[in-house]
Image: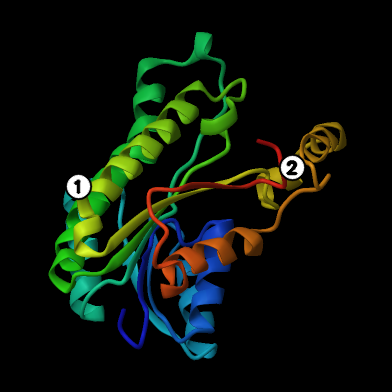
Amino acid sequence: MSDTPRILLTGATGTIGQALVELFSKKQAFVGIQFRKNREGAQELLDLAQSNGGDGILLEADLLDSAQIESMVEEFVQSAGGIDSLINNAGGNADKLLYFIEPDEWENTIALNLDSVYAVTKKALPAMVEQRSGSIINVSSISALKGLPGQTSYAAAKAGLHGFSRALAREVGRFNIRVNVVCPGAIESPSIEELTDERRKWLEDAACLQRIGTPEEVAHLIDFLASEQSSFITGQIIAVDGGVV
């Protein structure tokens, strides 16, 4: 790893992404801030990173477009001079029972949560192989571990991400590249804030710690997995859920 950590982060303007940018910038990292539409939010994150002593680059890209993915990764590697960590954090789901899911909705969920990870990782790998080091962290969900109603497409995509990550860890370990998965549970976010009190209480009761997690608690684990402190950890799937699973 270089003296200045070089980190490519997808889904940077999301709740966990924001916490990661703030955390990495305090370590003077150079962060590739990927966003799709929210340029204003991405610029605010870059300003925050620079005010904290870090730096970075804005990377506007639709992760469902392979050409835009290629340009994004190339721009980051050229600007940073390499890549130490890739954090595949982008994703999303609109809950719907399988009975009501249309084929295009199913395909879009798989594309956003799994196909995009394949495309970004495949493009980023050559730089890591060349430097003989790297850490890839894929952000999943406890939905893939536990199974939640209304999330068949999302759970299928994230479970696929687990298999992808474990197999990739086997393939690239000889190049000193590590691959791990982080599975957040219920984490404070705008979507959690919109829940009814009854639904929020249900989520809290499901956890051993009887509360909702914070983005920072997920970010600290990802930071650990991106660092040399986790140099003998690969092929792992780790839940950050307060004890739901």
**From the image, which quarter does the N terminus lie in?**
bottom left
**Label disc, if present, on residue 194 of the rendered structure:** 2
Up the image or down, 26 lies above or below 245; here it is below
Label 2 crowd bin: few (<14), some (14–19), many (20+), radius 10 Å: few
Secondary structure of residue under mark 1? helix
Residue 30 in the image, given as x and y percentages of width and height:
37, 80
**From the image, which quarter does the C terminus lie in?**
top right
Residue 122 in the image, given as x and y percentages of width and height:
19, 51
Compare marks 2 and 1 and give the one earlier in the sequence: 1
Provide the residue designation for mark 1.
66
- Mark 2 to mark 1 CA distance (whole Å): 33 Å
**Label disc, if present, on residue 7 of the rendered structure:** none
Label 1 crowd bin: few (<14), some (14–19), many (20+), radius 10 Å: some
Residue 136 in the image, given as x and y percentages of width and height:
35, 58
Instruction: Tell me the kind of residue under disc 1.
Output: Ser
Specify whether residue 5 is in view: yes
Give the left or right position of residue 231, taking residue 218 as reference: left
Up the image or down, 190 lies above or below 200; here it is below
Instruction: Tell me the kind of residue under disc 2.
Output: Glu
Give the left or right position of residue 22, taking residue 162 as reference: right
The mark tally for this picture is 2
Query: Nearest the camera: 232 or 137?
Result: 232
Give the left or right position of residue 3, taking residue 79 as reference: right
Q: Residue placed at 49% from the left, 91% from the top?
A: 53
